[in-house]
Image (cartoon, grey):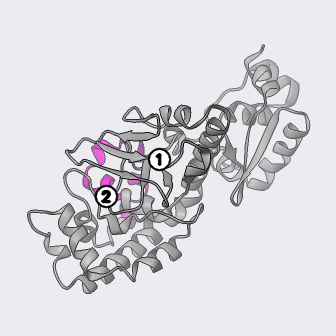
């Protein structure tokens, strides 16, 4: 059990962040044990040929049977919308002692051959292979992935603002709960510690590659909770939604289809991917639907996320 004592039960104690580095590193779990991540199988099939040219021995060595990864590869993000080049660059200054200790924590019985050698040399090899992995397997799909992560943060921010921290944490993960000012995270392992967020705060990072709440292995790391993002089940789907016939007759089949898709916040880019059309074409319809009061929008970072308004909900459901 990991316990974080919140310095104050208020919204200012908690912040959200999206980290491409986290997703890159946590996705290595799917390479080691794809059966545990059935919703990512379409992506794994899509990148099969691309990953064949990578150093898979080294990539797989960055996880263990419990699917732990070295803490230094998933540092607490400090930017709400991080960039992979910045995050990888920041890792170049990781000390040899930290590299050695974190790798040993993941592989306490001895390092795999791929991770043996001087820490500085091993670190350079790790960063190089992660960059190659990003270029081949992540960069083509990152916009789509990021959209789901952004939608999750918008949703949880709304819950937190309307109902408070406890309500927001109650919906994060069945193994995470807020008792008073103590956040408790139940892990599958025997790992246990308690630490305060005073002076450090708590960062929450949604992930497409986490099946339950996860924290740093070491209590010395800044308080950080990685949790499963909402909407993962729709990540690799194309649109199969059939809008009500009456609604399609009223506003047109394309706009009715968009309205049917927008039950949860979604960006123009994600809609374009799911509908296999250009973002420009989607934008024209979104503007018309919003002008009619059927959609609301909110900006998150560089994206604008749309979802149905109450009127749009009623119209879609035929009420």
Label 2, secondary structure: give it. loop
In this view, 242 is above or below 275: above
In the depicted view, which residue is nearer to us: 100 or 287?
Answer: 100
147 in magenta: no
Q: Is residue 66 left or right of residue 139?
A: left
Q: Element at badge 1?
A: loop
Looking at the image, is mark 1 or mark 2 nearer the viewer?
A: 1
Image height of 256 relative to 10, above or below: above
Judged by its main secondary structure, the magenta piece is helix
Please give the range of residues in magenta: 27-49
Q: Who comes first in sequence, dot 1 or dot 2?
A: 1
Give the labeled residue for mark 2.
219
Residue 292 as seen in the image, left or right of residue 149: right
Tell me if residue 32 is in the magenta stretch: yes
* Residue 192: percent from left, percent from top: 25, 47
Q: Which one is in front, 97 or 289?
A: 97
Residue position marked by numbered label 1 in the rendering = 6
Q: Quadrant of residue 29?
A: bottom left
- What's the residue at 35%, 79% (across, down)? 94
Q: Residue 274: give x, y in percent of width and height.
A: 63, 45
Identify the residue at the far right of this view.
291
The number of discs equals 2
Other residues around mark 1 within 10 Å, as few (<14) / some (14–19) / many (≥20): many
Q: Residue furthest left?
A: 109
Q: Is residue 5 above or below residue 246?
A: below
144 displayed left or right of 31: right
Q: Position of residue 182 (x, y in %)?
A: 42, 40
């Amino acid at each position: 059990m990991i316990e974080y004592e919140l310095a104050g039960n208020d919204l200012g104690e908690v912040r959200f962040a999206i980290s491409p580095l986290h997703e890159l590193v946590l996705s290595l779990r799917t390479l080691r044990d794809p059966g545990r991540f059935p919703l990512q199988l379409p992506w794994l099939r899509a990148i099969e040929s691309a990953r064949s040219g990578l150093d898979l021995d080294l990539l797989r060595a960055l996880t263990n049977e419990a699917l732990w990864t070295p803490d230094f590869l998933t540092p607490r993000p400090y930017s709400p919308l991080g960039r992979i080049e910045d995050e990888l660059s920041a890792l170049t200054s990781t000390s040899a002692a930290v590299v050695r200790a974190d790798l040993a924590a993941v592989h306490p019985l001895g390092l795999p051959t791929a991770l043996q050698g001087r820490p500085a040399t091993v670190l350079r090899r790790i960063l190089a292979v992660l960059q190659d992995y990003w270029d081949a397997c992540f960069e083509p799909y990152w916009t789509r992935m990021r959209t789901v992560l952004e939608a999750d943060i918008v949703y949880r921010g709304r819950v937190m603002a309307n109902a408070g921290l406890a309500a927001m944490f109650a919906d994060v993960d069945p193994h995470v709960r807020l008792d008073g000012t103590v956040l408790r995270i139940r892990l599958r392992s025997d790992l246990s510690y308690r630490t305060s967020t005073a002076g450090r705060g708590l960062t929450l990072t949604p992930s497409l590659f986490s099946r339950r709440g996860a924290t740093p292995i070491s209590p010395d790391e800044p308080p950080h909770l990685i949790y499963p993002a909402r909407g993962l089940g729709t990540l690799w789907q194309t649109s199969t939604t059939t809008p009500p016939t009456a609604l399609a007759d009223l506003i047109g089949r394309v706009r009715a289809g968009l309205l049917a898709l927008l039950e949860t916040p979604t960006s123009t880019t994600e809609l374009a991917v799911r509908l296999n059309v250009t973002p420009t074409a989607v934008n024209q319809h979104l503007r018309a639907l919003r002008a009619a009061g059927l959609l609301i929008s909110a900006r998150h970072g560089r994206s604008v996320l749309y979802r149905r308004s109450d009127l749009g909900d009623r119209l879609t459901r035929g009420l």
